[in-house]
Amino acid sequence: MKRNATAVWNGTVKEGKGTLTTQSTTLNKTQYSFNSRFAEGVGTNPEELIAAAHAGCFTMKLSADLTAAGFVPESLETTANVSLDNGVITTSALSVTAKVPGINEEQFQTIAAGAKTDCPVSKALNLTISLTATLQS
């Protein structure tokens, strides 16, 4: 499987602007700029997209691993906070809240930790990844 996205940029890094389009067109000429990356400008940015990819991938992997262990997740909600420090993407902090009937805390923590390590986006990222996993009753 291969997926693609296209970035178009016009102008200097600070005054210019660009668009991002994904193969699925979920992003279709979506605006990004210096301000959307480093200030509060309108549009997306690479770090936000990495965070979305990491949260989505981890959550799907956690669902798959829970299912393989015989548990059916009622709900999984994950936030990924990606940090850009001095021009380097340094961390992705995953935080998941889950409702999984029949699982105990130890089983959940073990499966969540495995999903953090084994999701394809985690494997692709060269940064520190942390996880806070909360099991709701």
Image (cartoon, rainbow, N blue to C red):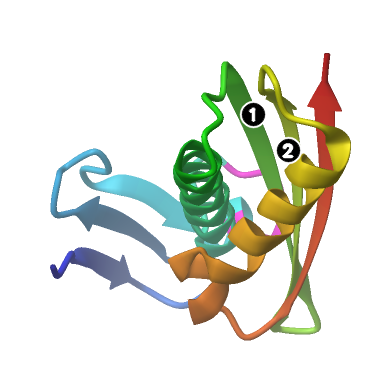
Query: Which disc number belongs to residue 96?
Result: 2
Callout 1: few (<14), some (14-19), or many (20+) C-alpha neighbours within 10 Å?
few
In the rendered image, residue 120, in percent from the top left (x then y), is placed at: 44, 68
Decide: is 69 above or below 2: above
Decide: is 132 above or below 42: below
For the point 54% across and 68% down, the residue is 118
Q: Is residue 67 magenta?
A: no
Residue 81 visible (yes or no): no
Give the overall secondary structure of the magenta segment: loop
For the point 73% across and 29% down, the residue is 103
Residue type at mark 2 is: Val
N-term-proximal mark, 2 vs 1: 1
Residue type at mark 1 is: Glu
Distance from Cα at disc 2 to Cα at disc 1:
5 Å
Callout 2: few (<14), some (14-19), or many (20+) C-alpha neighbours within 10 Å?
many
Q: Secondary structure at mark 1?
A: strand
The answer to whether marks 2 and 1 mark residues whose Cβ atoms lie closer than 8 Å is: yes
In the rendered image, residue 135, in percent from the top left (x then y), is placed at: 81, 28
In the rendered image, residue 90, in percent from the top left (x then y), is placed at: 76, 78
The magenta region covers 37-41
In the rendered image, residue 1, in percent from the top left (x then y), is placed at: 13, 68
For the point 48% across and 51% down, the residue is 61
The quarter of the picture where residue 115 lies is bottom right
Judged left or right of residue 48, residue 6 is left
Dividing the image into 4 quarters, which one contains the C terminus?
A: top right
Judged left or right of residue 78, residue 95 is right
Give the residue pinned by disc 1: 77
Name the one closer to the observer, 106 or 92.
106
